[in-house]
Image (cartoon, rainbow, N blue to C red):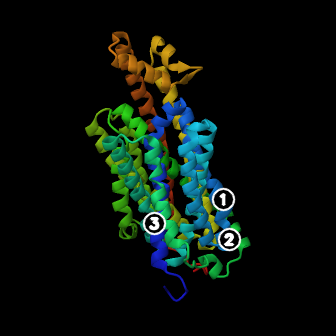
Amino acid sequence: MNGAGYNAQKLFIASCIALVTTAMAFSIRADILKELGTTFDISHEQQGLVNLMGIWGFPIAILLVGPLVNTIGMGRLLKLACLGHILGIVFTILSPNYGFVALLASTLLVGLANGTVEAVINPLAATMYPNEKTHKLNVLHAWWPGGLIIGGLVTFALAQFFNAPWQVRLGMIIVPALIYGAMIWTEHFPPTERAASGVSMGEMFMQILRPGVLLLILCMCMTAITELGPDQWVGSVLTDTVGIRGILFLVYTSGLMFVLRLVAGPVARVFTPIGLLAICAAFAAVGLYMLSYAFEAGMAFLAATIFGIGKAYFWPTMLGVVSERYPRGGEFLLAVMGAAGMIAAGVAGPSMGRIYDEYTIRNLTPEVRQIVVVDGRYSPEKAAELRQQAEAGDPTAQEQVKVLDQALREGAAMTFRVVAILPAILVVLFGAQFLYYRARGGYRPVSIDGH
């Protein structure tokens, strides 16, 4: 307990576990997406809509409560997030009894809980550690890939060794939700840095009109699509392109992110936060482009390594930059950055699914297209039926499955190839900002009193 009446270490650890919960929801959903497709007989585009609900709940929540975290209270909001996580997962498990709309609604509830967590933990970390924001935000957000690893390994082990259905694997998300809920339920929370410094809410809102902030919001959208768009599809895509469980690649790249974010402070001091972002964008562009041509495990591993390094610092460093350069924007700017990133990533989900479907259908022969395309949409259920016929020994079906698998590889690859354009643009945008700061003596954090 510090002099201000709150336990900073305990609150920081609870924040990390809350972020683990949100990340587990993300990685486990990525792994079970194909099974949801079969359970509800939905196309890749409709599966992208499931991702959209999970992601769009985030900006809805963060925009509604982010600017008000000091008014409502960070403790109250984290308790609501805990309840949202638990109820959302329970309702998702029960959703097959009520149909596709119930799946969308329950996924949205989990997304709302995720957004509420993000709305609280970023200003909380910035408030508790005002002199090391970029570093602490990177350490905090190391537990995003940490949670992806935990969720990925849990869902893989349960599926591989216990043949557990998707409902059981999804239910594992409740465990960390209960842990962080228990840790924060009776704890005191500090006022935000902005409120404690006497900056009015009116001035806080006005910060968004500054040109530098608007540019950072644009960059946040593009970094979020680069990081989170492929992550939503990596399980499904690499299963089709390489033929092994893609969730393991998500676990691997998340491991890289976890380690790299823990040492963000020294790395950012060497390159400056903006220089670091430019370097990351270059790695991400190369990695994604290579992934789009990775049709064997060795190439996929190398490409995933380069991409994992590239995406490592995007999210928390963007938050650190806006908090360091525009501290009077307080919790509002942090909320807007998080919301903008998730809205962009949410749009990317179904868009990537549409690309996936479009290029898959393009590469099918007319005969196979008649079988697996229903009302202009790729049908996972029809594809599964075709595979069953092939496994039963039907030689015609076996040849058709080969055509289908090749078409899926081509469709999957294009999802990465298109997204690779964005980090290439970011190299230019971050490079220009780096030169701008260098011409003015270098990048420096701004204190909340304006010095």
Residue 305 vs 75, above or below: the answer is above
What amino acid type should be assigned to the residue bearing mark 3?
Answer: Cys
Is 343 situated left or right of 395 in this image? right
> Which mark lies nearer to you, 1 or 2?
2
Cβ–Cβ below 8 Å for labels 3 and 2? Answer: no
- Residue 254 pos. (x, y %): 37, 53
Q: Circle 2 sits on which residue? A: 72
- Distance Cα–Cα, label 1 vs label 2: 14 Å
How many C-alpha atoms fall within 10 Å of the one at disc 2: few (<14), some, or many (≥20)?
few
Quadrant in which residue 163 is drawn: top left
Say what secondary structure mark 1 lies in.
Answer: helix
Quadrant into which the C terminus falls = bottom right
Q: Circle 3 sits on which residue? A: 16
Residue 242 vs 200, above or below: the answer is above
- Residue drawn 71% across the image and 72% down it: 201
- Distance Cα–Cα, label 3 vs label 2: 21 Å
Cβ–Cβ below 8 Å for labels 1 and 2? Answer: no
Q: Circle 1 sits on which residue? A: 63
Q: Nearer the viewer, residue 410 or 39?
A: 39
